Image (cartoon, helix red, strand yellow):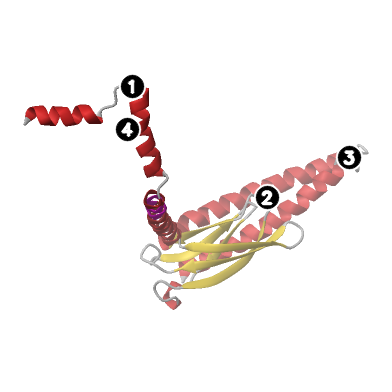
Amino acid sequence: MIYDILHNIEKIVPHDMKETRSKVLVPAYRFVTSANFILGIIVVIMILAVVLFQYSFAYEQEAIDRNGIKNIVTTDLNHSATSVIFEYCSNKYTRDIVGALVTSNLDAVPVPVKTDNIPYRKCAVYGTSILAESDTVGVTLFEQNRVDALISSFNTKIHDLKNALTSTEQKISTYKKIGYFDDKVHPLEQQSKLLEKQIKSAQSGLKTLIAMKNS
């Protein structure tokens, strides 16, 4: 019995290169090039593709749910102004949301969100305009408990912008007195105009936040 088993194993095991080719390499090559093997590989790839797609889609949907924002579209207007349109989506993560904060490298604009009017798992379109340069626009949601902190932040921002405007105007006045115009004054005048727009936008945003707090 044992002898027969060992004898059969001895027959299968190759003893030289010729036997290795005939007993191992050739059968292996025939197997991997067979229609059944190739079909099996294709089936495995298709199954993996479906599984990975479902996982990717689920992860993307989870990210949308947690953020509550999707389909942000920006359009350049003029004088650094950008139109922003986005969708707010109601779900289990966004039930207590009261507003969206649209931000850029130059500005921040609060947008009130009426969650009571939006059915669960549905989305609504909101929009605003904001001062922005290049592709720097983002949108985040905030709850009622963050309104006071945002009001404080906007007050600080307005104070800092006004100080920057005063400093810029003083520089303009000084340069004009000593005869500098195009090379020094013009860039500062552009900066002054931008600061004025930023102050106006921040003041408008502050009024919006105060109204949200008192509503």
Disc with the residue nearer the chain's start (3 vs 1): 1
Residue that carries the numbered disc 4 in the rendered image: 23
Measured in 3D between alpha carbons, the distance from the residue under mark 2 to the one under mark 4, in whole angstroms, is 87 Å
Check if residue 41 falls in the magenta segment: yes
Q: Is residue 173 left or right of residue 198?
A: right
Mark seen at residue 16: 1
Measured in 3D between alpha carbons, the distance from the residue under mark 3 to the one under mark 1, in whole angstroms, is 87 Å
Mark seen at residue 102: none
Residue type highlighted by circle 3: Asp
Residue type highlighted by circle 2: Lys
Assign the magenta stretch its main secondary structure: helix
x, y (%) of residue 163?
68, 46
x, y (%) of residue 166?
73, 46
x, y (%) of residue 120?
39, 73
Q: Which secondary structure, mark 4? A: helix
Identify the image quadrant of the N terminus. top left
Whether residues under marks 2 and 4 lie with C-beta atoms below 8 angstroms apart, the answer is no
Whether residues under marks 2 and 1 lie with C-beta atoms below 8 angstroms apart, the answer is no
Identified at 32% across, 32% down, the residue is: 23
Disc with the residue nearer the chain's start (2 vs 3): 2
Q: Which secondary structure, mark 2? A: helix
Residue that carries the numbered disc 3 in the rendered image: 183
Kindly indicate the quadrant of the structure image that contains residue 144.
bottom left
Mark seen at residue 162: 2
Please state which of the two labelled residues, at mark 4 or mark 3, is closer to the viewer: 4
Disc with the residue nearer the chain's start (2 vs 4): 4
Measured in 3D between alpha carbons, the distance from the residue under mark 2 to the one under mark 3, in whole angstroms, is 24 Å
Residue type highlighted by circle 1: Asp
